[in-house]
Amino acid sequence: MATTPALDDALLDFTSRENWDKFFALRGDGDSFEWYAEWPQIKAPLLSLLLGEEGTEILVPGCGSSSLSEQLYDLGFRRITNVDFSRVIVADMLRRHARVRPQMRWRVMDMTNMQFPDGSFDFILDKGGLDALMEPEVGTKLGMKYLDEAKRVLKLGGKFACFTLAESHVLDLLLSEFRFGWDMTIQAIASEPSSKSAFQTFMVVMVKGKMGVVHTIKSLVDQSAEYCNMQQANAVIHALQNENKIRESHNSGVDILFSLRDLQLGAIGDLKVIVPGRRRQLILGEQGSSLYCYKAVLMDAKNQTETFAYHCGVFIVPKARAQEWLFASEEGQWLVVESAKAARLIMVFLDSRHASADIDVIKKDLSPLVMDLEPEYPEETDPMPFMMASDGVKQRDVLQEVTSEITGPMVVEDVLYENVDGDQSCMSEKMFRRLIFKRSSGLVQSEALLMRESPSDEMDSKTKNSSTSSKKKSQKKGLTGIFLFNVNLDVQFYCYGVE
């Protein structure tokens, strides 16, 4: 194995094009370099994946000056495309191989933004490319962009073989990004007996399959085997065990709460396609990408033969109404979908985290999050509409706000409800008095219809109410948290606190 030239701290950023140009310039022309796992160690496991497929279109992203491509070419795999964003190394590799290996292709290209059409390759071979992008201080952004590109240019049924040191931040990304629709296998690469390497190399293989299908990872990493770094191997084994538990839960039929990224990765199939009757719960937003997180439900209308007003809409449910049957139950939610006249409805539930936010701020925050959930309608050009359930109250008069040691802050209020069913005689001019515990503001603890008494009965009513109040107070003496309200209306409002 070739030795690494002395590098100063400025060259240790492996995500920088300029640093790689300097690195290869320091090495000079005509020299091959392998960071880890040389050809004798990876030949057998790699060829087992390519057996009998000499005509395979192979992509080697971040090829560098590795001899891997020439080894495969000399074994009969002629359709190899190598890409690297360093012009220095691509020019050097072209000089070396153009005559002796004329069918091999070389491209100056950023592997996080490749210029190949979708489904161009049968096999992707990554040897340290992902590891180089996953500098801990850089985060996962570049790694995610690269993996998205790799998945895009790989054909259905194609294989992605990644040679990696499987550090925790790299392995976590691989496991989550290839959770849905990919068949994954991992094995350790054997080291030579004389090798003094401090790190174990692994080969992770992903086979592109049908969206939404979750496979258990096949592990060929054995706790009883001898590896050059047992701590590293045990960490991989532990990570795979945890990941397989997650995958088993997805296959168990339990109603999983998905993240937006899960859906983008194909957890419930192709989001661009409407699936009649599909309903999935998810969390929208995350720290750093949005102001708030939101619990949501994605629902595709059961009857897609109807004429819809919208191909996709967002329906916001305020905290005060989130516990109502219409919004909290699956049956009620389907009624909302039907009433909204949308082929797909995304119901978003607000909670205490959003209490101080203006609704326009909420809509602005949600807009980029729901864009990825919009189905594909080529003829649709109108923006996705936002709808909102009101709190159901047309008029509200707060009578009193008090605090109890047992129940906390409470509000007594008189409300006039909106006419929701079109029956004017039912709700018009009817006032209700209700008690709400602020800790559960979405629930009305007690409620009574208020009726005005006739002037002729007012004096008798006062005498009667006074007598009745005293009698009921005496009868209810054994109960805690009793409240009596009587403000010249013919109703006595009782509600009982909670011990």
Image: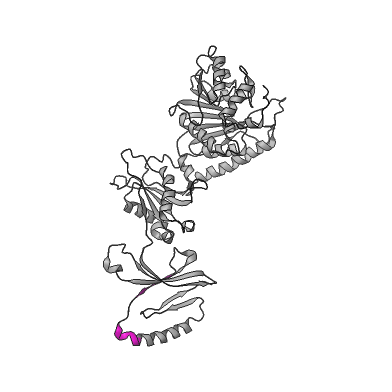
Taking the spot 45% from the left edge, 85% from the top edge, the residue there is 470
Is residue 301 one of those drawn in magenta? no
| Residue 30 visible to an observer of this rendering | yes
Is residue 458 one of those drawn in magenta? yes
- Locate the N terminus by quadrant: top right
Taking the spot 55% from the left edge, 36% from the top edge, the residue there is 174
Q: Nearer the viewer, residue 99 or 329?
A: 99
The quarter of the picture where residue 431 lies is bottom left
User: What is the number of callouts on the image?
Assistant: 0
Q: Position of residue 60 (x, y in %)?
A: 53, 25
| Residue 334 visible to an observer of this rendering | no
Taking the spot 56% from the left edge, 44% from the top edge, the residue there is 245
> Against 172, is 53 above or below?
above
Q: Nearer the viewer, residue 383 or 495?
A: 383
Q: Position of residue 467 (x, y in %)?
A: 41, 87
The coloring applied to the image is: one colour
Q: Nearer the viewer, residue 448 or 53?
A: 448
Q: Nearer the viewer, residue 36 or 353?
A: 353
Q: Position of residue 339 (x, y in %)?
A: 32, 53
> Against 403, is 241 above or below?
above
Taking the spot 50% from the left edge, 31% from the top edge, the residue there is 150
> Against 285, is 324 above or below?
below
> Against 157, is 295 above or below?
below
Span of residues in magenta: 446-460
Q: Position of residue 40 (x, y in %)?
A: 64, 21
In the picture, measured across the screen, residue 39 lies left or right of residue 267, that is right
